[in-house]
Image (cartoon, rainbow, N blue to C red):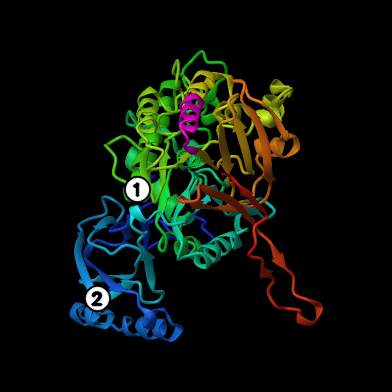
Amino acid sequence: MTDSLVFRSDRPWPNPRLRTGAVVGHATSTSVRLWLRTARPGKFALLLYGWGDSTASAGGKRALGAALSGVPLALEEALRRTAALRHVEFSVRNYEADTTHVLDLDRLEPDTWYGYAVYSQDEERVLFGHNRLRRFRTPPAEAERRPFQFALFSCHMPYRVSGLFRKRTDLANLDMWDFLGASLRRHEDSLDLVIAGGDQCYTDGVPTLDIWKKLNESMRRESGQLLPDEESMLSWYRDIYRGYWGFEGVRRVFDSFPTYMMWDDHEIGDGWGSHWLEDGGPDDGLARMFPSLEDRGLTRDDGRALAHRMFRAASRAYREYQHSHNPESPDGVWDYSFRRGGAAFYVLDGRGQRNIERDSYRILGREQFDRFAGWVADLDPDDTPFVFVVSAVPVLHARSALVGADQRMLLREVGLGDDLRDSWEHRLHDEERAALMRVLFVAAARGIRVSILSGDVHVSAAFVIRDGDGNSIWQLTSSAITYNIPRPLSWILRLGAADEGVTEEGYRFERFALYADSSYALISVHPEDGEAWFRLYGEQKVKAPPDAAGQAAVPLSHSVARIRLF
């Protein structure tokens, strides 16, 4: 019996999986980190060319695409046809990193559009970038402090099951990626980056594709060896990424705009880090994770070993597919920071260090928290008047809905245990949450305009939080871009989110928006004017009139909520 999914074609994906493609990652005014997947080992070259007026026209695009589609096509001829500024040769030696490779392109010009294509030297043809031309724009120089925009999305789960026995995997809600792409292109000359705020794929989204279900069905001992092994598990996680990222709408966003990513639980497993796995905990998280453990003749120690093995495999896949194109960080450190024209961004890792069984600082861990607190303390309000902190799980969201609720009922009736413990507002996180809010309000008191950016909860919202001195922080949540299965916590949030109230620490909060359907957000920043705006977009369409029956509905381009933050 083989557990690996390498070279397996029997997974019930209803869409083509990602084979070749690109992600435009961390960008500065003079550099871009470019992630590539070639689908096979070999020798390749990146062709980088200028994106001028002739290329931008419809006719110019068709002509260049046709010119690059010839086979065989010598490298020198491909360079001539693109009028390439340069080319970068690279090799993918084996399948060790699932044929992914990252190039750091430097010596670029600020605020400039570049086209690119990947060429296979072994096959003498363009691998991709000919059938659909790829391009990206470098941001302006930091010193210019021009107004800019960025996008925020989270929670990409476009699958559902159907059929008499619920074994057919269907697609739904993918229009949101087309809407997001259209919004980004409409604002492309000022759109500097995209933040993917967690759950860019789901290891456990639907039963037909659930790799934790696969683990429960295949875990065993053979000849004294606990199986599946880590390499097999890694193939499962790679399969998930390639399935979820195989959609054209997803690829058009990722390969066109600098995209900064952070994982959340579903890139690992539902509620990762919020389950008690050790014996004697308040509830039996191990039994929930592995309901068939005893039936398969395995011990609780075996279950813990398999869970941690899955985490290691998930971490390797996360590095390959997501973190490798983020800003550089030390080994084992997933949190990172970057700047963009008068704004500083810090992306917190609320999942890789999360451990509900730790005595304190169970979400970030003390080392990461101290690293973040030191970073905030070093900020100069004159250099970076705006700060955006990415926390995949909102710091404020659930409290307003759960005040007065019978939490034992919620645990019993709708299985909310790990969702509640996942929340920053759970009592287990009081110390860490209070410390985080102190750091942010000290920054706000120094004149820094602070916003927290989140996803996770499948409800979009905007809250302002104020301290007793009148300093304010915004909690902005955009979730989910695609999701087709009701989530208990989001159901409760929709029913009971309060308009205003007081947090455990005594901060007052007020809700300015709550949107329960699929969405994404655009945030605009005006450093010189000290202004920032939050715009939330949902799936809005105008149906065709009766005399135009059969024509597609027209998507609306205006936001469902527009809020001035500062």
Residue 314 picture location, percent across and down: 39, 40
Q: Around disc 2, counting alpha carbons within 10 Å, would you say few (fewer than 14), some (14 to 19), or many (20 or more)?
A: some
179 vs 435, left or right, is right
Q: Secondary structure at mark 2?
A: strand
Residue 215 picture location, percent across and down: 46, 38
Q: Secondary structure at mark 1?
A: loop
Query: Which numbered marker is on residue 169?
Result: none
Q: Residue 441 colored magenta?
A: yes
**Range shown magenta:** 436-449
The residue at the point 58 percent across, 60 percent down is 174
Query: Which numbered marker is on residue 84?
Result: 2
How many marks the image carries: the answer is 2
The residue at the point 55 percent across, 21 percent down is 284
464 vs 358, left or right, is right
Quadrant position of residue 470? top right
Label 2 is placed on what type of residue? Ala
Q: Nearer the viewer, residue 318 or 153?
A: 153
Residue 236 picture location, percent across and down: 41, 46
Tag 1 residue: 326
Instruction: Give the quarter of the figure containing the C terminus.
Output: top right
The residue at the point 58 percent across, 43 percent down is 477
Magenta span: predominant SS is: helix
Q: Residue 128 colored magenta?
A: no
Residue 4 picture location, percent across and down: 37, 47
When the figure is inspected, residue 311 is found, relative to residue 319, above or below; the finding is above
Q: Earlier in the sequence, mark 2 or mark 1?
A: 2
Q: Residue furthest top?
A: 280
